[in-house]
């Protein structure tokens, strides 16, 4: 009950940013998708694979109309992750609400779990449905003649996970009591390294493993810092 | 001896090289209303945060309700009410929302009727968001939230700071509600000595991180006194009387502020110094506090424990 109360509170704090991220992604992602569909219909700007053509998988990914939309998802996800990290761990410091939140019949672990769970739900719920909707739109044969690659769809979820890594990085930096020019940026720097390492992976499994390892490293630091930090 | 609900032992806190709390030894018995006073930056908030386990001590320890502050369990925290400095609450929540949020952490203790009565007494609109409330209204919400779970120990960090006289009075009356409940202990820090005088039965004075007094309010008020001595010729150059806090020469008069010096000793010293006559002036708590914590008197320790009565 205490966890669900904390979760609801954290989700409510995320809500405006969830809506904003979903709208931004829908607007830009949808715009690029529509623009590409229009280009293809009128100018045949993109390669038109006819039946019987031998197509390399890489070629499909390269020409997928979801490439620009995927970039929008990547940016929206990182942006939302950063904002949620600031909302959850930087703002309470400025508004001095930490003592009010921490002095209650719930352990620090429960309070932290509430925040982390809320952030992961917020990222998945705000960007996931929009991504599914745009993918389904792009899959319609009357919209694009180029068949959609399912790999691109999975890549989208990898981007959402990267948003969570950005959240963890912001969280760790927010919890650090060091100076901003000192080790305070360690969290953000580690998150940036994990994100770059993940997008450099060609295989999705490698990207996933990179994210999991990076997230675990960040999480272990966050838990230790949050449980022992002074507020 | 009554049960000790709050206890610190050589509690010390450094912020970098700055000493905020210095070997703070405090014992608060159950059922007392304790005013925790000190000048700005004396270390009141730091001491309170150390007691609540929100800060880690550099040295020493503290215990609340028999549990070490650094390991306060959710069950123990449930028994301790805390009103934060500045009444920092979640600004986006409504009063009703905050009540619901807070209630879920005290499922068995929460007194719905008491909270509703307090909100009605303070005339607070339940649907209003915290960010739209005045400072005084936030203080009232904060107090109602802290009192509704009926805590055994209530710790308040400067709860009346920035409130006008009318709101302060209402706030104190709300606090008295809790005091009326038997066996409840309150520790509240304040700059306003009038508030302390009105509701406390015990006073704890902290000065530059050092505990200067921990005694009943009555003892404190009796202990600090001003003596005006008149001399026929000139006032003596040297004043060496026990418990001297402050000495002021005005023409042929000598004004002494003393702590813990009994009337007999004053009489003896007046005779030996050749005073024509002397009289003891009653001081109010504010004057006593100012004299007692004057920078020149730093570390002139005065600590009356119950055993010294």
Image (spheres, grey):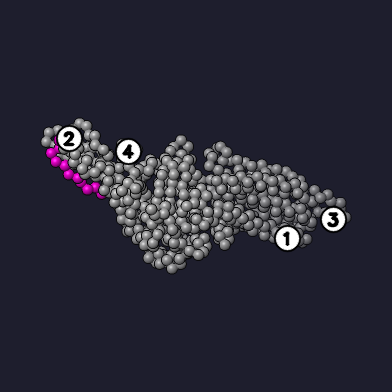
Separation of disc 3 and disc 4 at Cα?
96 Å
Residue that protrudes farthest toward the left in the picture: B232
| Percent x, y of residue B230 | 15, 39
Of residues A191 and B286, the one drawn nearer to the viewer in this rendering: B286
Magenta part of the chain:
B273-284
| Percent x, y of residue B104 | 52, 62
Of the two numbered discs 3 and 4 in the rendering, the one whose residue sits closer to the viewer: 4
**Marks 1,3: beta carbons within 8 A:** no
Badge 3: how crowded within 10 Å, few (<14), some, or many (20+)?
Answer: few
Of the two numbered discs 3 and 2 in the rendering, the one whose residue sits closer to the viewer: 2
Marks 1 & 3 on one chain: yes
Q: Earlier in the sequence, mark 2 or mark 4?
A: 2
| Residue B116 to residue B7: above or below | below
Q: Earlier in the sequence, mark 1 or mark 3?
A: 3
Q: Which mark is residue A50?
A: 3
Q: Which residue is mark 2?
A: B273
Marks 3 & 4 on one chain: no
Toward which corner of the image does residue A196 lie, by quadrant? top right
Q: Which residue is mark 1?
A: A136
**Marks 2,4: beta carbons within 8 A:** no
Q: Residue B276 magenta-drawn?
A: yes
Taking the image as shown, residue B308 lies to the left or right of residue A198, namely left
Separation of disc 1 and disc 3 at Cα?
22 Å
Q: Chain of mark 4?
A: B
Q: Which residue is mark 4?
A: B300
| Percent x, y of residue B272 | 17, 35
**Residue B88 visible in image:** no
């Amino acid at each position: 009950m205490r966890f669900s109360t904390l979760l609801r509170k954290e989700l409510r704090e995320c809500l405006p940013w969830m809506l904003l991220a979903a709208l931004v992604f829908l607007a830009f992602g949808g715009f690029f998708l529509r623009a590409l569909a229009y280009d293809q219909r009128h100018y045949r700007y993109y390669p038109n694979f006819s039946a019987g053509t031998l197509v390399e998988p890489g070629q499909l990914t390269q020409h997928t109309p979801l490439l620009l939309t995927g970039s929008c998802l990547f940016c929206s996800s990182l942006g939302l992750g950063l904002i949620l990290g600031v909302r959850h761990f930087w703002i309470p410091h400025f508004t001095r609400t930490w003592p009010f939140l921490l002095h209650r019949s719930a352990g620090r672990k429960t309070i932290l779990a509430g925040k982390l769970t809320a952030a992961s739900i917020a990222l998945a719920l705000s960007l996931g449905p929009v991504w599914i909707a745009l993918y389904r739109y792009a899959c319609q044969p009357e919209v694009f003649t180029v068949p959609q690659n399912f790999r691109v769809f999975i890549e989208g979820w990898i981007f959402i996970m990267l948003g969570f890594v950005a959240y963890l990085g912001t969280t760790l930096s927010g919890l650090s009591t060091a100076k901003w020019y000192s080790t305070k940026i360690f969290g953000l720097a580690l998150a940036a390294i994990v994100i770059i390492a993940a997008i450099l992976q060609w295989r999705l499994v490698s990207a996933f493993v990179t994210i999991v390892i990076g997230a675990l490293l960040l999480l272990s630091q966050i838990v230790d810092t949050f449980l022992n930090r002074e507020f | 001896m009554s049960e000790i609900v709050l206890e610190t032992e050589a509690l010390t806190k450094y912020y970098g090289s700055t000493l905020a709390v210095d070997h703070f030894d405090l014992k608060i018995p159950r059922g007392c209303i304790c005013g925790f006073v000190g000048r700005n930056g004396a270390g009141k908030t730091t001491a309170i945060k150390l007691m609540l386990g929100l800060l880690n001590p550099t040295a020493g320890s503290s215990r609340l309700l028999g549990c070490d502050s650094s390991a306060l369990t959710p069950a123990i925290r449930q028994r301790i009410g805390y009103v934060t400095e500045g009444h920092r609450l979640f600004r986006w929540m409504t009063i009703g929302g905050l009540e619901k949020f807070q209630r879920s952490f005290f499922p068995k203790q929460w007194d719905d009727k008491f909270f509703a009565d307090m909100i009605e007494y303070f005339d607070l609109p339940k649907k209003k968001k915290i960010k739209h409330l005045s400072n005084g209204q936030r203080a009232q919400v904060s107090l109602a939230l802290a009192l509704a779970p009926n805590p055994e120990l209530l710790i308040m960090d400067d709860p009346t700071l920035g409130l006008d006289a009318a709101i302060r009075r209402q706030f104190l009356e709300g606090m008295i509600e809790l005091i009326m409940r038997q066996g409840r202990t309150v520790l509240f820090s304040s700059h306003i000595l009038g508030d302390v005088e009105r509701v406390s039965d015990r006073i704890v004075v902290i000065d530059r991180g050092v505990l200067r007094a921990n005694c009943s309010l009555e003892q404190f008020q009796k202990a600090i006194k001003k003596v005006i001595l008149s001399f026929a010729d000139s006032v003596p150059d040297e004043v060496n009387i026990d418990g001297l806090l402050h000495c002021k020469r005005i023409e042929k008069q000598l004004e002494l502020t003393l702590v813990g010096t009994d009337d007999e000793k004053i009489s003896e010293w007046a005779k030996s110094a050749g005073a024509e006559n002397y009289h003891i002036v009653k001081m109010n708590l504010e004057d006593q506090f100012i004299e007692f914590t004057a920078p020149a008197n730093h570390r002139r320790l005065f600590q009356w424990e119950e055993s010294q009565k």
